[in-house]
Amino acid sequence: MPTLRLALSQVNPSVGDLAGNADLVRGWTRRAADAGAQLVLFPEMMLTGYPVEDLVFRRSFVAASQAALERLAADLAADGLGELPVVVGYLDADGPPQVSGDAEPGRGARNAAALLHRGEVAARYFKHHLPNYGVFDEDRYFVPGDMLTVVRLGGVDVALTICEDLWQAGGPFAAARQAGVGLVVNINGSPYELNKDDIRLPLVRRRAAEAGAAIAYVNMVGGQDELVFEGDSMIVTADGELLTRAPQFVEHLLVHDVDLPAADDGVAAQHVTADGMRVVRGALEAVPPAPSGPAVTGGLIEPVADEAEVWQALVLGLRDYVNKNRFPSVVLGLSGGIDSAVVAALAVDALGSDRVVGVSLPSQHSSEHSRSDAADLAKRTGLDYRIEPIQPMVDGFLANLSLSGVAVENLQARVRGVILMALSNQEGHLVLTTGNKSELAVGYSTLYGDSVGGFNPVKDVWKTLIWRLAKWRNADAARRGETPPIPESSIGKPPSAELSPGQLDSDSLPDYDVLDPILIGYVDGDLGRDGLVESGHDPAVVDKVLRLVDTAEYKRRQSAPGTKISMKAFGRDRRLPITNRWRENG
């Protein structure tokens, strides 16, 4: 039985950075070669980054991707790595974009994988299953492939597949069984969602059983706009045994020796068709010999607690948004409340305290404990702390405008937004907004006030989870002998916007322990009023909450991007019309 030493390169590409991404491939291939690898795998759309969205429609970008692939193959050979087979994702096309007037049926842009060897593209594969749900619009961009590429290397028949091919039964994995392959390679750009890692392993096992072959699953890591990719690469045998698994949220080279069945010449001679897919075969003349010595194992990383997983996702998403967009630093308002405290702690973890500016913006309604909590957090984290009282500016507006009630409350929030944006313009910071998902859902924010900002790290985090994250982060710091970053009083006190005397969130909203389950059912689960009532929620409360959610759509449409951690984040996951008279209560 042949043994292949596989190297799964769990790396962090950047969208549009063709040269930088190619350099990543060259550097990590060198590491894989030094580890004695015989086959190196990189993620989906590695050369272009993922997702490229409407860049697909730019023929100049497609041509640049194709040229970068050919150049990468030659560069690997020039690096002395030409004998080592490398699988890399890229953007290809065999015809004009489907949206163009000269489009051709069955041809167009392709989500592709290439096997590079000896300075050339030895084999190509086009993604068969194109996801068109949630954040995915691949049916808009790509034409599906109808061929399964099988390459013989090191005495093993290896099939190439891409991401969604794994998530759908039939297609490439059914064809792989009929083709008699020993290994299916699956390269991925699979975005993170909480507990997705619990779904992924059983899924890989199902596809391994369907294909009758081992699966090498490699996923990218890193942030791209609202998406974050957590890695979680793995190798699973044909009978479902998990051989090795990479850590989440960090770049990692997972190297493991896998025993695989020898290629069957009798099966290879057959003309195989399955689920409308043709099997196209090729062979590499030689690969690096199997290293001598003891077998190499990649190890098994155990999953972490939900709060730790979410925290890592939010930190990585924020860090990459700031760094990939080349912001030198971030600024946020520090109210002394739990939301701004969590965002500040995330920012310090992501960027370091020297790149985070926290601004206390007290008004006449700001309590002394809120001011002291903001100062305490700054001391705990070491961030750049400033105090900018807003009352003189608010009074200036009120001296020239006749305002009362909510208008005065919103004026305070908007003055704070103006100050933060002024600091952004003057000093180059990215403004972080701090509204959680519960507040965004019910419209509990002021447009151009506390909603102002270029990125919201907690946009997809329910209020009840905000508290859990704060407690976890403090406990984690205590376990490591460090100062907990979030003041206990920020965690324990009742939430308040402090825009009027004695104001509390509970004055106008149900308690968050009541509110969040309704919102989760309505927003994430698409339950209607009847379904929510049948689940045990009070009908009057349900009616109030749904009315708040439905009428706040225009606010959410204008909100800053933020890291997605749930199955349905506000944004591309949930697309509802702003002008909409449908109401669940009739």
Image (cartoon, grey):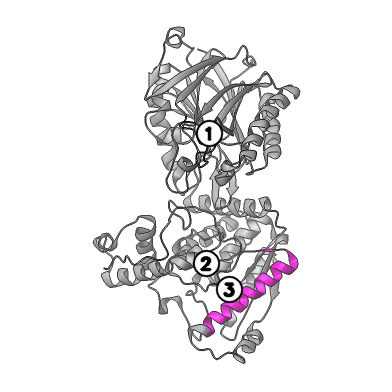
Q: Mark 3 highlights which residue?
A: 336
Query: In the image, residue 337 lies at what x, y percent?
Result: 55, 72
Distance between the alpha carbons at the discs numbered 3 and 2: 14 Å
Range shown magenta: 408-432
Question: Secondary structure under badge 3?
Answer: loop
Q: Is residue 476 above or below residue 98?
A: below
**Mark 2 closeness class: few <14, some 14–19, many ≥20 residues within 10 Å:** many
**Which image quadrant is residue 21 in?**
top right
Between 191 and 418, the residue placed more toward the observer is 418
Q: In the rendered view, does 34 fall on the left or right side of 449? A: right
The structure residue drawn at horizontal position 50% and vertical position 42%, both measured from the top left corner, is: 99
Q: In the rendered structure, find residue 110 and report the number of the disc placed on it.
A: 1
**Mark 3 closeness class: few <14, some 14–19, many ≥20 residues within 10 Å:** many
Question: Secondary structure under badge 2?
Answer: loop
Between 107 and 136, the residue placed more toward the observer is 107
Between 191 and 315, the residue placed more toward the observer is 191
- The answer to if 410 sits in the magenta stretch is yes
Q: In the rendered view, does 307 fall on the left or right side of 415? A: left
Q: Is residue 525 above or below residue 48?
A: below
Mark 3 / mark 1, whichever is N-terminal: 1
Q: Are marks 3 and 1 in contact (CB under 8 Å)?
A: no
Looking at this rendering, what residue extends furthest in the front direction? Answer: 101
The structure residue drawn at horizontal position 54% and vertical position 49%, both measured from the top left corner, is: 227
Q: Mark 2 highlights which residue?
A: 435
Mark 3 / mark 2, whichever is N-terminal: 3
**Residue type for callout 3:** Gly
Distance between the alpha carbons at the discs numbered 2 and 1: 38 Å
**Residue type for callout 2:** Gly
The structure residue drawn at horizontal position 48% and vertical position 82%, both measured from the top left corner, is: 503
